[in-house]
Image (cartoon, grey):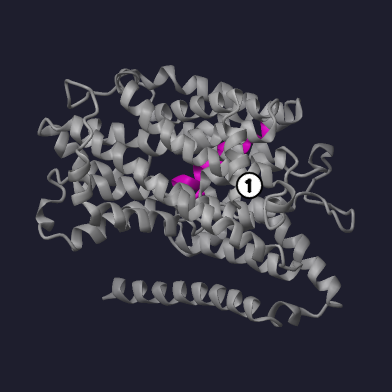
């Protein structure tokens, strides 16, 4: 592992790779600071750029964006009480009151310090777990891989916002989209409706652009004419003293722990980690009434958890091919587009890329810290601009991403259709990330299930003939029945 990491850092320190990582982190901070934009959207915009790059430089750019958006979201949360990212909503609870007291610089300092610490903590966990899990995953058979993917979909459905039923519906739609095209085993057309363009399936890049790009822009059209009124008059970052930060060890240790652990659970991501960390720190505080009124621990805990998820989400993505959140789902798409197979064999077939990504994750955290300190005034300037200047560029680059995937207009039409469809799904509480995960994992489940049955002479008991498989089935059954039980309890309470 150590040799692989050294090689990964050596690749990252190549001037071109380092430049792309730096620019990606800068772009991530910028995108995260702007309400209405998001990490998945920024990575989607970068898709057309990645086609002309080697896998590692392309993915380093995306990792920079991914890490940068985590801290960028706190800028607008603290200065505007309008979080740039969903996870930043928790930071706004105490960050904005601090800004109203004239402590905006200190609040930004706590956020910056905490984000860097959370990212570094999760990086240590990631580099420790990924090689270990990968070595186990390499010994997995087709039945194991199929169950891992099914468990991932069930976990995503269980832990995403809203009801598990809506999660299952989203996943099912994704599975249907993933089933379109020529059956790889029997060479039979499925759901093509006579269209030659659909023989190879729904263009994956177009699906990502539509669901994560167009759908979000459509939902945020109300922000087009808005500009921002900032509560602060002086814009800088004032880092707390090391002693002061160390005194808040409960806040950053809880945030770092929950960020790394929850980040590894598919579908939960930073949103769940930040609120859980905030709640635990508040409930165990000697002065819980101070929270919501400008308590620094209320900034430290969620921001540490927010960036702490970056390493956690990489664990299932790089070892099992199961994305931890929307951004890593798009990175999986990028791996596919560059001819790499995410999942249990990635460490064996693309170890150089894996270790390069892990090295880039740590370096992006360093860049995030340095850029935030030096360029906060620029980000504040952009915060004041009208969204009408930004959204057209998002649409243009997203369209370019869809077109560049096949160099024809059919993927653009698919992206527009899925964008409108995704907008209506989100409006009704169906998270589009569940649809995307269904598209990604559906073919994996189908192929490995059929292969496992062929090897077992069509004996379905092959899925329960080892202890790991029984444990996975137990987790799946538990999640489903637990959701049914909670649904019955909620129904009983509503009738009272």
Q: Report which residue position mark 1 lands on.
A: 4
Residue reaching furthest to the right:
187
Q: Is residue 227 above or below residue 71?
A: above
Secondary structure of the residue carrying numbered label 1 = helix
Q: On the picture, is 368 further left or further right than 329?
A: left
Is 423 in the magenta?
Answer: yes
Q: Residue at x 47, y 46 (%)?
A: 426
Q: On the picture, is 458 further left or further right than 485?
A: right
Q: Is residue 494 above or below residue 100?
A: below
Q: On the picture, is 118 further left or further right than 344?
A: left
Residue 191: x and y, percent? Answer: 77, 50
Is 252 in the magenta?
Answer: no
Residue 493: x and y, percent? Answer: 29, 74
Q: Which residues are magenta?
A: 413-431
Local packing at callout 1 (Cα closer than 10 Å; few below 14, some 14-19, many 20+) is some
**What secondary structure predominates along the stretch shown in magenta?**
helix
61 vs 384, nearest the viewer:
61
Residue 337: x and y, percent? Answer: 71, 38
Say which quarter of the image contains residue 109: top left
242 vs 206, nearest the viewer:
242
Q: Residue at x 69, y 29 (%)?
A: 51
Say which quarter of the image contains residue 140: bottom right
Q: Residue at x 68, y 35 (%)?
A: 55
Residue 385: x and y, percent? Answer: 34, 18
Q: On the picture, is 27 further left or further right than 207?
A: left
Q: Residue at x 42, y 29 (%)?
A: 31
């Amino acid at each position: 592992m150590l040799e692989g990491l050294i090689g990964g850092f050596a690749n990252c320190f190549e001037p071109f790779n380092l430049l792309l990582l730096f620019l990606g982190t800068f772009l991530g901070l910028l995108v995260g600071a702007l309400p209405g934009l998001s990490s998945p959207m920024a990575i989607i915009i970068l898709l057309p750029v990645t086609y002309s790059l080697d896998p590692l430089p392309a993915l380093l750019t995306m990792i920079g964006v991914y890490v940068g958006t985590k801290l960028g979201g706190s800028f607008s949360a603290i200065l505007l009480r309008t979080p740039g990212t969903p996870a930043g909503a928790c930071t706004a609870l105490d960050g904005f009151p601090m800004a109203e007291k004239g402590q905006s610089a200190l609040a930004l300092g706590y956020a910056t310090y905490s984000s860097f610490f959370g990212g570094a903590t999760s990086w240590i966990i990631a580099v420790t777990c990924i090689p270990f899990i990968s070595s186990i995953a390499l010994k997995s058979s087709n039945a194991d891989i199929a169950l891992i993917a099914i468990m991932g979909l069930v976990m995503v459905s269980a832990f995403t916002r809203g009801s598990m039923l809506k999660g299952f519906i989203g996943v099912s739609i994704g599975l249907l989209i993933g089933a379109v095209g020529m059956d790889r085993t029997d060479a039979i057309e499925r759901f093509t409706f006579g269209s030659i363009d659909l023989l190879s399936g729904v263009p994956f890049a177009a699906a990502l652009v539509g669901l994560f790009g167009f759908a979000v822009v459509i939902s945020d059209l109300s922000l087009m004419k808005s500009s921002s009124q900032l509560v602060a008059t002086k814009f800088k970052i004032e880092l707390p003293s090391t002693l002061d930060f160390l005194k808040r060890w409960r806040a950053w240790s809880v945030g770092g722990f929950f960020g790394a652990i929850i980040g590894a659970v598919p579908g939960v991501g930073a949103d769940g980690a930040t609120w859980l960390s905030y709640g635990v720190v508040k409930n165990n505080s000697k002065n819980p009434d101070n929270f919501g009124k400008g308590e620094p621990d209320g900034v430290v805990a969620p921001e540490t958890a927010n960036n702490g998820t970056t390493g956690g989400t990489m664990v299932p993505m790089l070892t099992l091919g199961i994305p931890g959140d929307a951004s890593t789902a798009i990175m999986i798409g990028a791996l596919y587009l560059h001819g790499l197979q995410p999942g249990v064999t990635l460490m064996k077939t693309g170890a150089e890329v894996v270790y390069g990504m892990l090295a880039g994750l740590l370096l992006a955290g360093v860049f995030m810290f340095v850029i935030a300190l030096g360029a906060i005034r620029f980000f504040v300037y952009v915060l004041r601009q009208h969204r009408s200047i930004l959204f057209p560029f998002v649409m243009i680059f997203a369209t370019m991403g869809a077109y560049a995937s096949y160099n024809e207009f059919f993927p653009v039409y698919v992206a527009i259709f899925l964008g409108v469809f995704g907008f209506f799904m989100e409006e009704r509480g169906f998270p589009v990330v569940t649809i995307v995960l269904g598209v990604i994992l559906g073919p994996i489940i189908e192929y490995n299930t059929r292969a496992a049955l062929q090897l077992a002479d069509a004996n379905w008991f092959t899925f329960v003939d080892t202890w790991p498989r029984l444990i996975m089935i137990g987790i799946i059954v538990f999640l489903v029945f637990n959701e049914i039980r909670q649904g019955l309890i909620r129904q009983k309470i509503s009738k009272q």
